[in-house]
Image (tube, rainbow, N blue to C red):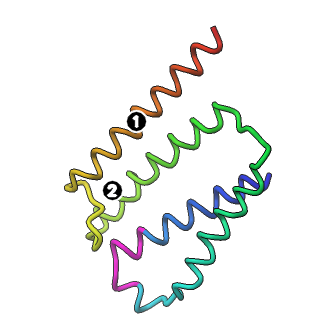
Amino acid sequence: MALKYITILIVLGFTVLFAYDYFPGVATTIEVPKAVFIFLVLGLFLFSMFLNKNKRDDQKTVLKSQVFLSFYIVFLMGLFTVLGGKSSSGISFNNMFFWMVFVIAIYEIFSQWRNIEKSHE
């Protein structure tokens, strides 16, 4: 159950960070201290490490998480672009590095999916 809360916090963190990146003017309206972001990211990272220290996640669960997060990021980029935002850090559909990372992520997802299918045969 705790992993679901961590996943929700990670998704919310991605959403806020992408909103700040695509709409930098929002940062002056809604001020969130950098220390809060740093504490949140480090806290989630350490908490997830200690929580999963001796626990092996189901391969299907990991695969579903990777698919969801990969396509959620693309969805956010598309939504914020349609809403008129422009990435100030360069994370956009015009960036070749983004597409290389996305293709690698898709390849990894299909590779894991094939391994899961083979293990069920």
Instruction: Provide residue 59's location: percent of width, then percent of height.
Output: 64, 31
- Do callouts 2 and 1 mark residues in contact (Cβ within 8 Å)? no
Q: Is residue 84 among what the camera can see?
A: no
Q: Residue at x 77, y 54 (%)?
A: 51
Q: Amino acid type of disc 1? A: Ile
Q: Residue furthest top?
A: 121
Q: Residue at x 53, y 88 (%)?
A: 33
Q: Nearer the viewer, residue 64 or 96?
A: 96
Identify the residue under disc 2: 78
Instruction: Provide residue 41's location: percent of width, then percent of height.
Output: 59, 69
In the displayed structure, 100 sits above or below 79; it is above
User: Could you tell me which secondary element the residue under label 2 belongs to?
Assistant: helix
Q: Horizontally, is 86 left or right of 39 in the view?
A: left
Q: Check residue 21 for magenta coloring.
A: yes
Q: Which tag, 2 or 1, sits closer to the chain's start?
A: 2
Which image quarter holds the C terminus? top right
Number of marks in the rendered image: 2
Q: Main secondary structure of the magenta part?
A: helix
Q: Nearer the viewer, residue 64 or 39?
A: 39
User: Could you tell me which secondary element the residue under label 1 belongs to?
Assistant: helix
Q: Residue at x 40, y 36 (%)?
A: 106
Identify the residue under disc 1: 106
Q: Which residues are magenta?
A: 18-26
Q: Amino acid type of disc 2? A: Gly
Q: Which mark is residue 5?
A: none
